[in-house]
Amino acid sequence: MHTYQQIDEKGASQYAELLKLIAHPVRLRMLELVMQCGSISVKEMCEALGLPQPVISQHTTKMKKSRVLKAERKQLEVLYQVEDPRVRQIIALMQS
């Protein structure tokens, strides 16, 4: 007989919200890029992904509010890093 640990309703709901948030092609590309770089500015993301600044800013704002990304000011720049360790695991799994 196999026993397994079942995710509770609250946990399942939290994971569903996280997956829904990152399940956007632009956000997935952004998260992969941020993980590869460690930390990166909006300008660098625009250049690397070939997308306009308003598009990148809209997505970084949404992910920052949900604590998927965190922002750190370095002099005149704001650098973004992946904050949520679950996102790191999901992106790493997708890359394997």
Image (cartoon, helix red, strand yellow):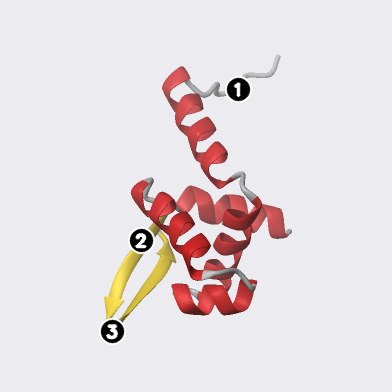
Q: Where the C terminus falls, by quadrant? A: bottom right
Report the residue marked by disc 1: 4
Name which residue type carries label 1. Answer: Tyr
Q: In this image, 17 relative to 74: left or right?
A: right
Q: Nearer the viewer, residue 42 or 17?
A: 42
Label 3, secondary structure: give it. loop
Where disc 1 sits, the SS reads loop
Query: In whole angstroms, how far apart are the C-alphas of marks 2 and 1?
Result: 34 Å
The 10 Å Cα crowd at callout 3, few under 14, some 14 to 19, many 20 or more, is few
Q: Position of residue 44 (x, y in %)?
A: 51, 79
Q: What's the distance in space between the residues labelled 3 and 1, CA to CA?
A: 50 Å
Residue at position x 42%, y 50% from top?
A: 62
Q: Are marks 2 and 1 in contact (CB under 8 Å)?
A: no
- How crowded pointer 2 is (Cα within 10 Å; few <14, some 14-19, many 20+) is rated as some
Which is more foreground, mark 2 or mark 1?
2
Q: Is residue 74 above or below residue 6?
A: below
Label 3, on which residue? 76
Closer to the chain start, of discs 2 and 1, is 1
Q: Where, quadrant-wise, is the N terminus in this rendering?
A: top right
Question: Residue 6 location in percent, x, y?
Answer: 55, 21
Q: Amino acid at mark 3?
A: Leu
Q: Name the residue carrying label 2.
A: 70
Q: Nearer the viewer, mark 2 or mark 3?
A: 3
